[in-house]
Amino acid sequence: MLGRRGLVRMIAGALALSALALGCGKKDGGANGDAAKQAESDPYWKVGSYLSLSGEETAFGVDSKEGIELAIDEINQAGGVKGKPIKILFEDNKSKPEEATNKVLQLIDRDEVIAVLGEVASSRSRAGGIVANRKKVPMITPSSTNPDVTKVGPYVFRACFTDDVQGRMGAQFIVSTLKKKKVGLLFASDDLYSSGLAKEFRDEVKRLGGEVVMEKSFLKKETNFTTYINELKSANPEMIYAPIYYTSMAPIARQAKAAGVPGSMFVGSDGWDADELLRDAAEELEGAYFTNHYAPDVPWPNSQAFVKKYKERYNRTPSSMAAQAYDAAKLLADAMSRAKEMTPDGIRQAIQETKGFQGATGTITIDAERNADKPVVIVQIKDKQFTYYATVNEKSAKQ
Ligand code: PHE
């Protein structure tokens, strides 16, 4: 419940924010010029973040917001960047790409932010990235893995690996590590992320000498998957690759178990990583694996330090979205502290030059295509928990 003091504080906060928006007004000269002027006179550096804080994939947005807030508080407590704190303005895109477009436009035109953090789902990062790139304001997506996202242009970066790497890792894990050559494939045909991974996976399975014995696709809005599961089952695959968000994976796992397809036959992708999947289908998915950016028990000192701080503050285990958002915010602050000029262009250049950044999700180097070079982790659902299984990387996939 919101107490009286909380309410007063909230209203005061809202007034301060709208005064800020009004005070900045609209000026000519493009986002870079406006933001530069704003940045000099403000008592803080204004950064925007657009996330799915409501709607279908709320868990993605909420977890990311927590990771960003933890990072920014740490940065500000340690003196901020170049003597000023960072202020984050969060916007909710309701899990919709059209809203992502609007919110990024609003953050840049109205609030004159000098950089943008977001989104999680690739479809929304692509929509938001098109705007950020057109407005020449740097954007870092913490966790959108579809290759198209950063292809939008020179202002769009990511702090995670891409799905060409992730899809290959999934195929390699099934065919080379688990030694299962006959695989089934199940994915959402109308989702950029899911269909992109399906393609990468299919190509790599073939290259490795395996065979996709049956593939089935569905639309994101579907809730009954029994027919697809039965058709897959009839083709006798040894494993099923399901690069799908947790929202569809939970009902799929339950319906598969009822149809006699055990959870341990599934291998998934990072979209599985949400508490909700464990809440709704941990039992059904016991033994399943998925590729990911991190695991709460990954044996890396930086990850463990992050997990400890996150648990202290939020009283729960951080998901990979939280870890990645934490890293993206810290990576941005690191770039800002190295930037020769505190303008969107100066910050863009510094992000591009990031090398060996030590994050909670591993060491990150930004490559020429603005993607992150970093490790891939295999997670197993074991005793109803996301459990670290192994670290793999691009090099090991090619061997
Ligand atoms: N990689 C997913 C995408 O690009 C988003 C995601 C990241 C989901 C991490 C869960 C965990 O759409």
Image (cartoon, grey):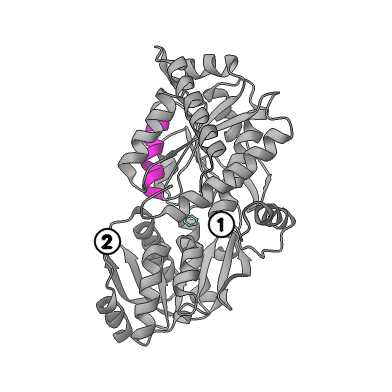
Give amino acid for label 2: Lys
228 and 313: which is toward the camera: 313
Residue 133 showing in the rendered view:
no
Query: In the image, which disc is placed on residue 221?
Result: 2
Image location (x, y in percent) of residue 74: 69, 40
Instruction: Tell me the distance, in whole angstroms, between the alpha carbons under discs 1 and 2.
Output: 25 Å
> Which numbered disc flags the more N-terminal residue, 1 or 2?
2
Q: Residue at x 31, y 79 (%)?
A: 229
Asked if 70 appears above or below 375 in the picture, the reply is: above
Callout 2 secondary element: loop
Q: State the image coordinates of residue 42 (x, y, percent, origin top left).
A: 58, 18
What residue is at 39 percent from the left and 46 percent from the top?
A: 148
In the image, residue 348 above or below residue 175: above
**Ligand 1 within 8 Å, label 1 CB:** yes
CB-based contact (under 8 Å), mark 1 and mark 2: no
Q: Main secondary structure of the magenta part?
A: helix
Residue 192 x %, y %: 34, 53
Instruction: Kindly identify which residue carries mark 1.
Output: 320
Q: Residue furthest front?
A: 4
Tell me which segment is drawn in magenta: 122-133
Element at label 1: helix
Indicate left or right for 99 with 80 as reference.
left
Query: Is disc 2 surrounded by few (<14), some (14 to 19) or many (20+) residues within 10 Å?
Result: few
Residue 292 is left or right of residue 333, and the answer is left
Q: Residue at x 43, y 66 (%)?
A: 204
Q: Residues within 10 Å of mark 1 (few under 14, many from 20)?
A: many
- Amino acid type at image mark 1: Ser
